[in-house]
Image (cartoon, grey):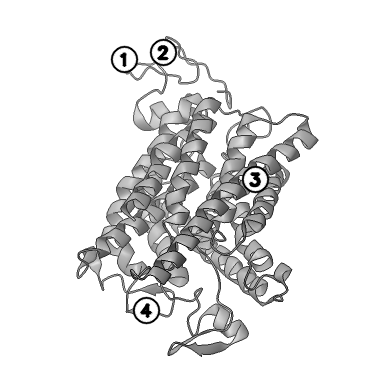
Amino acid sequence: MLIAASLVLMMTTPALALFYGGMSRSKSVLNMMMMSFSAIGIVGIVYVLWGWSMSYGDQDVAMLFNNPFETFGLKGIEGVDYIFVGFQLTFAVITAALISGAVADRLKFSAWVVFLPIWVTLSYFPLAHMVWGGGFLSHAEGGLAALIFGTTEAAGEIVANVAPVDYAGGTVVHINAGVAGLVLAILLGKRLGFGKEPIKPHNLPLTMIGAGLLWFGWFGFNVGSIVFPADGSEESNATFLAETSLVWLNTTVATAAAIVGWMVVEKIRHGKATSLGAASGVVAGLVAITPACGALSPVGAILLGLTSGALCALAVGLKYKFGYDDALDVVGVHLVGGLVGTVGIGLLAVSGGLFYGDGVKLLVVQVAIALFAMFWSAVATLVVALAIKAVMGLRVDEENEIDGLDFSEHGESGYELGTSRGRGRSSVAGTTTDKVKEGAGA
């Protein structure tokens, strides 16, 4: 578990920082990376203070969240339980950091810093409790699944007849972050030049390295989320090993298939398969298999990956059709991929899946929890963002956006190569140099 937690922490930095940093423009690369680093700093502290308490505990509030003061500051937590706190902390961090890709090039860093602790409090911690802490989106009596298809008694506990499945965060992490990114992108408005001139990634090798590191770290994300506790017996250990092995293999083959799915769509639509598409396909496959990794066969995982890669490749273009500027495709990859994985369980799960002859009940439950997660995240994000906008504003001014957020927000430049192009001012001398005001140019 400690190794798994460390792998998930690596997913935020350096993996996500490199992935998003390479996709951004050269004049905002440090700002993009700083959003991931600041997510670790802020959310990590908040999680210890009240995040764990809101997510897990015995003082449930309306099945929506747990009492934030029950174990405030990890009061009463000790020993081996710290392992589970640490592991769950890294999930909260990466979820918040994922949102940053939707707001690249135009969000005030100060607004981001204020947004992080409030958003995880109102959106992430409640959804974590609802899904994994015995709340409204779990198998618990009184939960959404129980309300739809009733309950039964199992091992002395009243549980839903059809239990929802989210192995490692399809709803809590990816749908949650994807919806939040969409809401923020709409409220912020489009980047200067969006839809009028090309806004291209400035360093695709960084993005590909980041994608590879994300894939590596994701084994901690999925395999570390083992839901069967081994008790030391030979039978228990065998079951534990079987589940972790299946999860590892499904994570691998679904991601491999998503790369292929994305590249095929690119080849058909544009005549070329791109490195950005391959890197994005990696993430699309990882996102989709996250909730489903323990419920599918390897063949089912391949089908899910192919579907996610293809649909996400198509979905990233929706921002041009509908006019929202999801800068680094958080909506197209994480929201769509999270929906593919969450809903796909209802079709492909070896136990309960429609394609295995078990009817539509699990599919109905999976659709219901996905829709509720979208609703919760949208409302929470809208409340937080509108409050911040009213008090301090969300977007940098036009001059700073043109200059680039590296200088305007941090007083630095990602590249000191003897030219002012793409950064506007020198962060070394601290004085204004000849600026190239290129609008949306790199």
> Reading the chain from its start, which is encountered first: label 2 or label 4?
4
User: In terms of image quadrants, where is residue 424?
Assistant: top left
At label 4, the amino acid type is Asp
Q: What residue is disc 4 on?
A: 60
The relative height of residue 312 versus residue 417 in the rendered view (above or below) is: below
Tell us which disc is closer to us: 1 or 4. Answer: 4
Q: What residue is disc 1 on?
A: 429
- Answer whether residue 395 is visible to the viewer in this image: no
Horizontally, residue 315 falls left or right of residue 242, namely right
Mark 1 vs 2: CB contact within 8 A? yes
User: In terms of image quadrants, where is residue 270?
Assistant: top right
| Residue at x 26% of width, y 71% of height | 69
Tell us which disc is closer to us: 2 or 4. Answer: 4
Mark 3 vs 2: CB contact within 8 A? no
Tell us which disc is closer to us: 4 or 3. Answer: 3
Tell us which disc is closer to us: 3 or 2. Answer: 3
SS for tag 4? strand
Q: Position of residue 45 (x, y in %)?
A: 27, 53
Horizontally, residue 2 falls left or right of residue 391, namely left
> Reading the chain from its start, which is encountered first: label 4 or label 3?
4
- Answer whether residue 130 is visible to the viewer in this image: yes
Front position in the image: 366 or 233: 233
Q: Quadrant of the N terminus?
A: bottom left
| Crowd rating for badge 3 (residues with CA inside 10 Å; few <14, some 14–19, many 20+) | many
